[in-house]
Amino acid sequence: MISEKEVIRRIEGLTIRRLRTWVTRGWVEPTRAEGNIRFREVDIARIELIRQLKSDMDINNAAVPIVLSLIDQLHGVRFELRSLAQAIEDQHSDVQAAILSAHDIRKRKDTDEG
Amino acid sequence: MTDNPYDVLGVKSGATNKEIKSAYRQLAKKLHPDLHPGDADAEEKFKAISNAYGLLSDPEKRARFDKGEIDATGAEKPQQQYYRNYGNTGPEHPYYSADGFQDFSDESDLFSELFRRAQAQSSGPGRGGGPQRGSDAQYHLKVEFLDAVRGAKQRITLPNGSNIDVKIPTGIRDGQTIRLKGKGHPGFNNGPSGDAYVKVQVMPHHLFKRQGQDILLTAPITLDEAVLGGKITVPTINGKVTMTIPPGANSGQTLRLKGKGVKTGDQRVTLKIVLPKEIDDELKTFMQDWQKSHSYSVRQELEGVET
């Protein structure tokens, strides 16, 4: 677990004030243990992303949570899709073939309808 | 990256700082790896423009580059841990969101069930200042091959001395994780305990191998069984079964025992003809006689190969 100080040290150009603002806005959600704020590696990566969204991509404060939410949803969808694909992978080859062909048919149908 | 930084950003060598910054921003929005979680090349591309911008946005470095004192590599930044590197951990991810599935429930019961479970798992830590869920604990568990393919119960001892029984689901694979709800670290302010995640390492078996849901086994057979056919007994993951060897069976030939694999999988038995330890005179004489009138060729394929 990583302290506030360590986060500031690791991320170039980040101030404690800015970090606390981001936490208050709910963009970063560190854990609290016995009154101390503690960051995880995933929080560090997220803070770095927020910093780049703001400074490198000129994304304004109103848009940052929107971008973060879309990215998190995308990861959620990708994860579920991947685990579903792995679950199909674990099935007998007959079951796999049935799922794949049903998927093909549905895609074609959706395309025709759309 | 050694490409000219002006070319990388697509600006003229006389570009103003503002033009350089604007060009970089355009490219960063297009190429940032976290905006392309599945694109393996995105990281390289983004690194190239970051390095180019790092060089050209520093007036001193830019001047030195223009005078040819330093090359385009400049000084590389330490490796960045992109957010997307943490993106694939699913519901244990503190920022996991399954909101992308909410509208699926009308069309697919399967997906709505998946979604419901995912939501239940992602009551993430750190939200607000009230009761807080304890953090998750990670454990490692070695599981015997047969326990993994058949399912089993195994007891693990936690660092604090207490024991928990872990139910190993049938067919679990090496590297999969079992989640034990509420068996992680205790919560704060009356919050619930975190979950324990048990990463499973499946030990290899000296006879069985696994491929998907199929179990692979090599069964030695005698020369006479190969020629005449017969019944042999082979082990499966659920006990011994008798199988029929067809007459004229060959080494490398695979026979399938339907439904004897993991869950709905099969057991595939590869035959291996094993000669007697000692070739006795009777067999030798028989073969010599047989050879005279029955020679046959088996290496046609190898003869055509030029080396």
Image: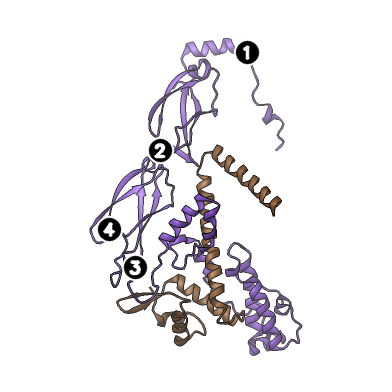
Q: Earlier in the sequence, mark 4 or mark 1?
A: 4
**Subunit bearing disc 4:** B
Which chain is mark 2 on? Answer: B
Query: Could you tell which of marks 3 and 1 lies nearer the N-terminus?
Result: 3
Please rate how many residues cluster around mark 1, counting C-alpha atoms within 10 Å: few if below 14, some from 14 to 19, many from 20.
Answer: few
Q: CA distance from mark 2 to mark 1?
A: 39 Å
Going from N to C along the chain, the mark reached first, 4 or 2, is 4
Q: Nearer the viewer, mark 2 or mark 3?
A: 3
Residue under numbered circle 3: B133
Q: Which shade of the palette goes to chain B?
A: purple
Task: Determine the CA span between mark 3 and mark 4.
Answer: 19 Å
Residue under label 1, please give it: B294
Looking at the picture, how far across and down is residue B11, in whole percent? 74, 81
- Which of the chains is brown? A
Q: Amino acid at mark 2?
A: His
Residues at marks 4 and 1 touching, judged by CB atoms closer than 8 Å: no
Distance of label 4 from label 2 (alpha carbons): 30 Å
Amino acid at dot 3? Arg
State whether residue A96 appears in this view.
yes
Q: In the rendering, at what x and y percent does residue A37 appear? A: 37, 78
User: How far apart are the alpha carbons under marks 2 and 3?
Assistant: 43 Å
Q: Quadrant of residue B240?
A: top left
In this rendering, do the residues under marks 2 and 1 share a single chain?
A: yes
**Amino acid found under the numbered disc labelled 1:** His
| Label 4 to label 1: alpha-carbon separation | 68 Å
